[in-house]
Image (tube, coloured by chain):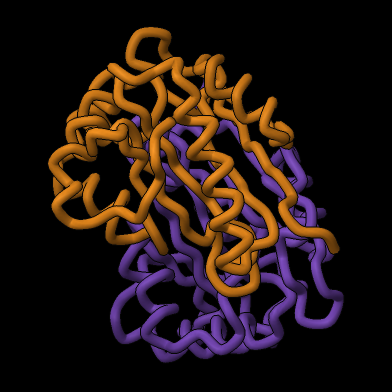
Chain colours: A purple, B orange
Amino acid sequence: MPAIRKYEEPDWPAVWSILEATIRTGDTYPFAPESTEAEIYKAWVEAPAATFVACAPDGTILGSYYIKPNQPGLGGHVSNCGYVVSPQARGQGIATQMCEHSQSEALAMGFRAMQFNFVVSTNERAVRLWTRLGFATIGRLPGAFRHSSLGYVDALVMFKQLAGG
Amino acid sequence: MPAIRKYEEPDWPAVWSILEATIRTGDTYPFAPESTEAEIYKAWVEAPAATFVACAPDGTILGSYYIKPNQPGLGGHVSNCGYVVSPQARGQGIATQMCEHSQSEALAMGFRAMQFNFVVSTNERAVRLWTRLGFATIGRLPGAFRHSSLGYVDALVMFKQLAGG
C-alpha cells in the first residue's frame, strides 16, 4: 500500500516523468502533448493549493495529485483535483487511494465539495472509478476534448458533495 | 447602439469601475467581493486572449467582455467568455450584443464552441439571456456559489457549439 505525503521539490523529476508519459499520449488530459516541463510544473505544483505524491515502501513515486479551489472567492468552497498514476503502477488502486486521500484533505482544508471539470468520456477507467467513489456526472461537454486518435470526444463534469448543508 | 471594439489600456479605470460595482454585490460573479483591482485586472485583461469594450457614441464605456480558451491544449478549441454591463446601462441589450460579438470573434479566433462554467442559477436574467442566445444548460453544480444574501445556490454550466463537426 503506497504512502501518500506532501510533494517536496526533489520529487519533481519523478512526478514530471509520470506526467510527461501521461500527457504525451493525448488521451486523458487537456494539457497539450507538446507542453513544456515548465508549463506543467506551473499547473501541477505552482498554481494549486497543495500537491501530494503516492510512494512505494522503497520511496519510488507511483502517482501524484494536486488540489485547488475550482473557482475564486464565492466559488472557492468547491475543490478541484487532478491525479496521475505511473504507467507502471496502474491497476493497483493508487488512483482510488489518492482520490480518497484528496477528499479528506479537501475537507481538512475547508472545502465542501469536489468538482472534476474535464473527465474525458472515453477514459472509461477514470469515469468508472470516480463514479464508484461517489462522483455524479452532472454534465457532458460535447466534443470538448480533441483526443489524439479518436478526434473530438465528449468530456464530463463530475461533482461530489463532501460536507452537508 | 453601442460600438464594440478591442480594449485599450486607457479603458481600465472605466472597466474597473463597472467590474467593481458588479463584484461588490456578490450575486453574479465568483470573484470575491473584496477582490483587489490588481486581481481583477489580471483575470479580465492579462489572462484572457482578448478583451473588448462596448462604447456609447460619446465614448462612454457601457460594458466589457473577455475571451479565452476554457482549457489548455486538447480542450483549447472551446472558448470561455465573461461579460459585464454597467449598472446604469442594463436592459438596453448590451449583453446580447456583446455575446453575439464574442461568438463571431470566437469563430474568427478558431474556436469551435463556447462554454460558461459558472452561471449563477439565481441570476435569472443571465440564464434567460444565454438560453435565448442558443446556450444549453448542460449541468447544474449544487451549491457551488456562495451568494451574498441567499447563501449556497447552484451554478450552471452552459455550452454552445459554434462550428459544425
Seen in the picture, residue B130 relative to A127 is either above or below; the reply is: above
Q: Residue at x 81, y 63 (%)?
A: A153
Image location of residue B69, percent across then percent down: 52, 61
Q: In the image, is B90 to the left or to the right of B161? A: left
Q: Is residue B56 visible?
A: yes
Residue A37: x and y in percent read 42, 88
Foreground of the two, B124 or A10: B124
Of residue A163 and residue A141, the one placed in the foreground of this image is A141
A68 relative to A19, above or below: above
Q: Position of residue B145 (x, y in %)?
A: 46, 26
Looking at the image, which residue is at 52% across and 14% down?
B122
Q: Is residue A136 left or right of residue A83?
A: right
The picture quadrant where one finds residue A122 is bottom right
Q: Which of these two is toward me, B86 or A84?
A: B86
Name the residue rendered at 72%, 35% in the picture: B134
Outermost residue, front direction? B57
Quadrant assignment, res A155: bottom right
